[in-house]
């Protein structure tokens, strides 16, 4: 299935051909401060709901401008869990008052929506788990994430259209799920009032 006016073959691209893949810093826990300015984002904070800041995590104060610039999570970021039980899981995250900890992958791209759809797929998750190494705690490397291969349209415009279409479906799904949750809450309320 193709968008109108696009007919070029798709080609295999590495994730690194479409984006920049990096990781965070090994911040010292002795520097953590419950009143610190910056949230320290670790693997435990990654979920599909990471768009919000409504979770608890360590905080830190940082005065070094270079460290802030390199690890600050302002703008659009796809985060990838690089070890533990949720290995390979991705989530969206953006917060100018947050910094990225070590062992969390960060993907940034000019084709953000398209790349997010690739990395949030079950295929990506399965491949990362297949490549993982370690006994008690499995882990993956930045190289393994960067080398992930997917069929991709050559046309940047077609990539953009696909990303936008799938994002719109995600957004609609979220809206519908909220409505369903509200209706269930209403039904529960009515049942309590009707059958006192």
Image (cartoon, rainbow, N blue to C red):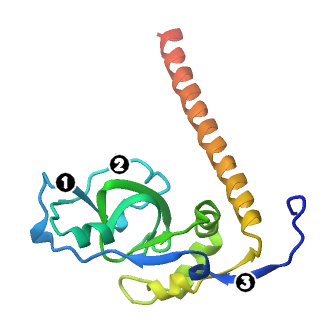
| Direction from residue 194 to residue 7 in the image, left or right | right
Query: Element type at marker 2?
Result: loop
Where is residue 5? Give x, y as percent.
90, 62
Whole-angstrom CA distance, mark 1 to mark 2, is 14 Å
Q: Which mark is residue 53?
A: 2
Whole-angstrom CA distance, mark 3 to mark 1, is 42 Å
Where is residue 171? Give x, y as percent.
62, 44
Q: Mark 3 vs mark 2: which is more N-terminal?
A: 3
Q: Residues within 10 Å of mark 1 (few under 14, many from 20)?
A: few
| Direction from residue 85 to residue 174 in the image, left or right | right
Q: Which of the two marks, 3 or 2, is nearer to us in this view?
A: 3
How many numbered badges does the structure rendering display? 3
Residue behind mark 3: 12
Query: Element type at marker 3?
Result: strand
| Direction from residue 169 to residue 134 in the image, left or right | left
Residue at (64% x, 49% y) in the render: 170
Q: Mark 3 vs mark 1: which is more N-terminal?
A: 3
Whole-angstrom CA distance, mark 3 to mark 2, is 35 Å
Q: Which mark is residue 37?
A: 1
Where is residue 98? Give x, y as percent.
30, 58
Q: Residues within 10 Å of mark 2 (few under 14, many from 20)?
A: some
Q: Mark 1 vs mark 2: which is more N-terminal?
A: 1
Mark 3 touching mark 2, by CB under 8 A? Answer: no
Residue 83 appears in the rendering: no
């Amino acid at each position: 299935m193709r968008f109108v006016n696009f007919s070029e073959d798709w080609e295999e691209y590495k994730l690194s051909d479409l984006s920049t893949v990096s990781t965070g810093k090994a911040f010292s826990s002795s520097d953590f401060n419950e009143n610190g300015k910056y949230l320290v984002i670790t693997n435990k904070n990654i979920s599909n709901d990471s768009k919000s800041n409504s979770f608890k995590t360590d905080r830190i104060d940082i005065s070094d401008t270079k460290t802030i610039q390199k690890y600050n999570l302002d703008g659009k970021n796809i985060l990838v869990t690089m070890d533990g039980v949720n290995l390979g899981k991705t989530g969206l995250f953006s917060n100018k008052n947050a910094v990225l900890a070590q062992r969390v992958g960060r993907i940034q791209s000019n084709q953000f929506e398209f790349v997010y759809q690739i990395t949030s797929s079950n295929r990506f998750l399965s491949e990362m788990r297949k490549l993982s190494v370690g006994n008690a705690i499995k882990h993956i490397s930045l190289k393994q994430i960067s080398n992930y291969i997917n069929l991709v349209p050559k046309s940047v415009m077609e990539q953009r259209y696909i990303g936008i279409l799938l994002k719109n479906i995600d957004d609609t799904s979220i809206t519908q799920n909220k409505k369903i949750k509200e209706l269930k809450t209403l039904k529960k309320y009515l049942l309590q009032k009707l059958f006192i």
